[in-house]
Amino acid sequence: MRRKTYYPFSFAVFPDYELLSEYAASAVADCIEANPGAMICVASGSTPRLTYERLPRIIDERNTEVGTMRLLKLDEWLDLPRGSAGTCEAQLTTQLVDPLGLRSEQYIAFESDPPDAQEECDRVQMEVRRHGPIDLAVLGLGRNGHLGFNEPAPALIPGCHVALLSPESQEHPMVRGAGAPPSRGITLGIADILRARRILLLANGTEKREQVRRMVDGAVDPTFPASFLALHHAVECCIDEEAAALLDTL
Ligand code: GLP
């Protein structure tokens, strides 16, 4: 791994996706080991898939106690049947909640089919307030620069909210098979994310290299929400060489 700094961002650049994922999984395990009651916020999608695959094994090997940690779902598609293929719920349950043996009170998660989406925002916001702040947030980098479903917009919303999904998000591979793609999502807000004690932003592959380059453009710009991470004091951007390709030309 090599390190690159483009103020204020610090990049850990890994030779490949496997090494990146191993590092990220160890960082999550370290956090839980140091603070067994930690609240870990997790994105879904393809980027963290291998990190989540590795995490239960590392936890098991180290014999780390997970009985008091909390797992917080970053975001969810709305108007998909609960737990159906393509939901963040399906991924997080299969990859983390079940393998780690988390009890229901340890898992704070937006439903994909709540009777009232605004009430669902209020419920999760309350839980975040009660148990927060987030100790470690594991984030992905959207193809349009979104974080969770904080979509590019003239202004960002601080707290949990219902988001109208951009065309890019509606084309996300998670929901490609879902007949009509969902038009709404539900997400933690940008302030919820920035209040995390520590953030790991993960990005891999050539399809993320332009987004990674845009992060270091210098502007904090709501039309590229990931740029707001420049305001946070403890973000580590973990990327692979493919995603770093354009950084090296700067
Ligand atoms: C999705 C999810 C985000 C995720 C991002 C990147 O829409 N809502 O939580 O971080 O987009 O996804 P991927 O890692 O598959 O590129």
Image: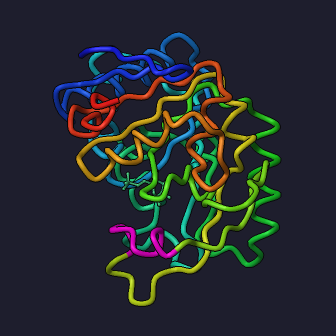
In the figure, 84 relative to 233: above or below? below
Q: Which residue is most to the front? A: 250
Q: Residue at x 60, y 34 (%)?
A: 229
Q: Quadrant of the C terminus?
A: top left
Image quarter where the N terminus lies is top left
Ligand 1 quarter of the rendering? bottom left
* Residue at horizontal 34 percent and vertical 77 percent from the top: 176
Give coordinates of residue 11: x percent, y percent.
Answer: 40, 23
Quick check: 125 left or right of 202?
right
Asked whether 88 or 165 is in front, the reply is 165
Q: Is residue 168 part of the magenta span, yes or no? A: yes
Residue 73 in the magenta stretch? The answer is no
Q: Is residue 210 above or below residue 111?
A: above
- Front residue (pair 135, 208): 208
Judging depth in this view, the residue of 16 and 244 nearest the camera is 244
At 45% from the left edge and 66% from the top edge, which residue is drawn? 87
- Residue 47: image location, x then y, percent: 33, 46
Magenta segment's dominant SS is helix
Q: Is residue 53 above or below residue 45?
A: above
Residue found at x 33% / y 48%: 208
**Residues rendered magenta in the picture:** 167-175
- Left or right side of 216 for 70: right
Residue 139 left/right relative to 115:
left
Across and down, in percent, residue 201 comes to 46, 34
Q: Which image quadrant is residue 155 in? A: bottom right
Image coloring type? rainbow
